Image: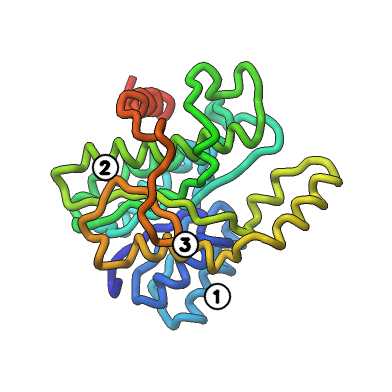
Amino acid sequence: MNGRICMITGANSGIGKITALELAKMGANVVMICRNVEKGEVARKEIVKKTGNRSIELLLADFSSQSAVRKLVHDFKLKYSKLHVLINNIGTIMPIKTFTEDGLETTFAVNHLGCFLLTNLLLDIIKKSAPARIINVSSESHKDRVIDFSNLNGERNYNLYKAYAQSKLANILFTYELARRLGDTKVTINCLHPGMVRTKIWQKSGRSMLMKVFMRIFSLFLKSAQEGAQTSIYLASSPELESITGKYFIDKKMVLSSPVSYDEGLAKQLWEVSEKLVGLKE
C-alpha cells in the first residue's frame, strides 16, 4: 500500500477511523472524508501521531448534500491526479423521517445516493489509476428488504430499520451493477458486511429512553470497531484480491448475498433511478 492514495468516507470514528489508521500504517496516502472539521482534524492528528505517516489529509463533505459531494470531488481533483482505493464507508440511520436539502429521505440519500454520486464522479480518475479498488460497506440487514421504488422517500410510511436495510441492499445492487460495467477495466468493486459493530450509528436507533438504554446494553455484545474494520482493510490491501470483483464478503470470506441482490434487472432500474435523483442524467 506504500504510496497508494486511499479515500475513506466517514473516517473520523468507528470502522472508518480504524481503516484509515491501518492503511496509514501500511504506508498509504490516506484522504479522510469527514463532515465535521474539528472531529476530523482530531482523528487525522491522532493517526499521524500513531503511524508516523504524514501523508494523511482531511477533506470535508456532508453526504446528505449532493452539492457538498460535488465540491468534495472538485477539491480532491485539484490536489490529486490518482485514486487507487475508494472506500464508501459512510452510513447513517435516522429514527424519524427527515429530508435532505435535495428533498430526499436522509437514510437513502446518505447511505446510497451519496456514495453512488461520489463513485461516479471519481470513476474517471479511478480508471486512470488502475489497478484500483472500490469498496462499499453494506450490511446483512439487506437480506430483510427489497427495493420499493414507490416508497424510496418514505412516501407511504417510514420505518428506520426498513429504510436502513433498503439502503444497504442498494449498496450491494450498485456494487454488482458497477462491477459488470467495469468488466473490461482493471478496477474492481466489492462490498462487505462488517458484522454487528459497536459504533455511533446505534446511538441514533432509539428515540425513547427505554430504547436508548436497551441499545446501550445491546451494544456491549457487538464487535469492536477494530474487529469490524478488518474486512474493509483486507479488501483494500490484500494482493490475492487484485482480480476479484462483484463479490460480497463477511469476515474476509466471500459469501452469497440475498437472492434479490443478484437481480440484474432490479440493479439496472436502481442505477437509472439513482442517476436521475443525483442529476447525472435528465
Residue sticking out furthest to the right: 209
Q: Choose mark 1 or mark 2, whichever is in front.
A: 2
Mark closest to the chain's N terminus, 1 or 3: 1
Element carrying mark 2: helix
Please provide percent x and percent y for residue 120.
Answer: 32, 40
Q: Looking at numbered disc 2 in the image, what kind of residue is underneath it?
A: Ala
| 119 with respect to 145 (left or right) | left
Mark closest to the chain's N terminus, 1 or 2: 1
Q: Can you identify the residue that label 2 sits on?
A: 179
Q: Choose mark 2 or mark 3, whichever is in front.
A: 2
Residue at figure coordinates x 38%, y 50% from the top left:
255
Please provide percent x and percent y for residue 65.
Answer: 51, 37
Element carrying mark 3: strand
Q: How is the image coloured?
A: rainbow
| 6 with respect to 251 (left or right) | left
Against 132, residue 175 (above or below) is: above
Local packing at callout 3 (Cα closer than 10 Å; few below 14, some 14-19, many 20+) is: some
Q: Can you identify the residue that label 3 sits on?
A: 58
Q: Looking at numbered disc 3 in the image, what kind of residue is underneath it?
A: Leu
Q: CA distance from mark 1 to mark 2?
A: 35 Å
Which mark, by number, is residue 46?
A: 1
Against 18, residue 273 (above or below) is: above
Local packing at callout 1 (Cα closer than 10 Å; few below 14, some 14-19, many 20+) is: some
Residue at figure coordinates x 54%, y 35% from the top left:
144
Residue 108 in view in this figure: no
Image quadrant assignment for residue 3:
bottom left
Tag 1 and tag 2, C-beta contact below 8 Å: no
Decide which of 172, 281 is in the foreground and name it: 172
Q: Choose mark 1 or mark 3, whichever is in front.
A: 1
Against 274, residue 30 (above or below) is: below
Residue at figure coordinates x 58%, y 29% from the top left:
105
Decide which of 110, 225 is in the foreground and name it: 225
